[in-house]
């Protein structure tokens, strides 16, 4: 088993996914700081991909900038994935903690983030007829991260390949359920606030009169 520093383990995991995550687990070399940094880079990547892509590919940007969708597509979706995976793993007797799921999932995102950032840069230099090269880079990052996700979840829970795929599918279903409940909760909370404000406004008006 390799004796690497925590930053070196990131490279080891990315380029040797099948043994890298196992080494990461047994060495307990995962870094929460690095994982949080990766999630922050995911947030930056989402903004760059949607706002800084080459104008010849996307020329209809909104004039107003709303940060909420990017927070949702990065931080909220990622945290929901971690919580849902941890919740579902209890049904399968998984061994992974929420911290380890967070770290492994964040490490798995690195090729996706890197390749999409590279694609964003390439969009400013390549013409539309050469867009196939940008797509190739982005698809490579997406597939690479998908393999890392499978390997990372498999290692953190010590599952078989089939059981890992089943867990990931159930995690996606759980994510939909969690997000649906969050929307309902926020809607209810909004209605309560509106109700309280309307009562306050009515009482203030009557006291003034």
Image: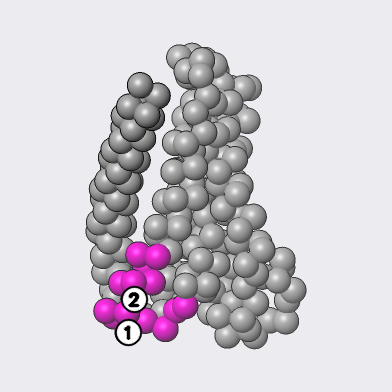
Provide the residue span drawn in magenta. 83-97
Image height of 78 relative to 104, above or below: above
Q: Residue at x 61, y 81 (%)?
A: 28
From where the camera sits, is residue 184 visible? yes
In the rendered image, which residue does mark 2 sit on? Answer: 89
Residue, disc 1: 93
**Would residue 144 be seen by someone viewing this image from the given angle?**
no
Residue name at image x 66 percent, y 63 percent: 33
Q: Measured from the top left, where is residue 80 in percent x and y? A: 40, 57
Q: Quadrant of residue 177?
A: bottom left
Question: Which SS class for mark 2?
Answer: helix
- Quick one: 116 or 73, which is closer to the camera? 73
Measuring 37% from the left and 81% from the top, which residue is drawn there?
Answer: 94
Give the alpha-carbon distance from disc 1 to disc 2, as whole Å: 6 Å
| Label 2 neighbour load within 10 Å: few <14, some 14-19, many 20+ | many
Expressed as whole percent of the image width and height from the top left, the position of residue 39 reads 56, 53
- Are circles 1 and 2 on residues that touch, CB within 8 Å? yes
């Amino acid at each position: 088993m390799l004796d690497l520093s925590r930053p070196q383990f990131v490279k080891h995991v990315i380029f040797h996914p099948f043994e890298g995550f196992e080494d990461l687990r047994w060495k307990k070399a995962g870094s929460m700081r690095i994982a949080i940094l990766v999630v922050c880079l995911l947030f930056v990547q989402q903004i760059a991909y949607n706002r800084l892509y080459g104008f010849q590919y996307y020329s209809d940007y909104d004039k107003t900038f709303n940060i909420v969708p990017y927070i949702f597509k990065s931080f909220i979706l990622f945290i929901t994935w971690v919580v849902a995976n941890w919740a579902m793993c209890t049904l399968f007797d998984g061994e992974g903690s929420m911290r380890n799921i967070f770290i492994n999932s964040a490490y798995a995102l690195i090729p996706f983030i890197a390749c999409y950032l590279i694609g964003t840069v390439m969009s400013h230099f390549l013409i539309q007829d050469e867009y196939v090269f940008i797509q190739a880079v982005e698809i490579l990052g997406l597939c690479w991260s998908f393999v890392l996700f499978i390997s990372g979840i498999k290692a953190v829970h010590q599952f078989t390949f089939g059981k890992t795929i089943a867990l990931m599918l159930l995690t996606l279903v759980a994510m939909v359920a969690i997000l649906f409940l969050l929307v309902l909760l926020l809607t209810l909370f909004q209605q309560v606030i509106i109700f309280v404000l309307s009562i306050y406004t009515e009482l203030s008006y009557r006291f003034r009169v």
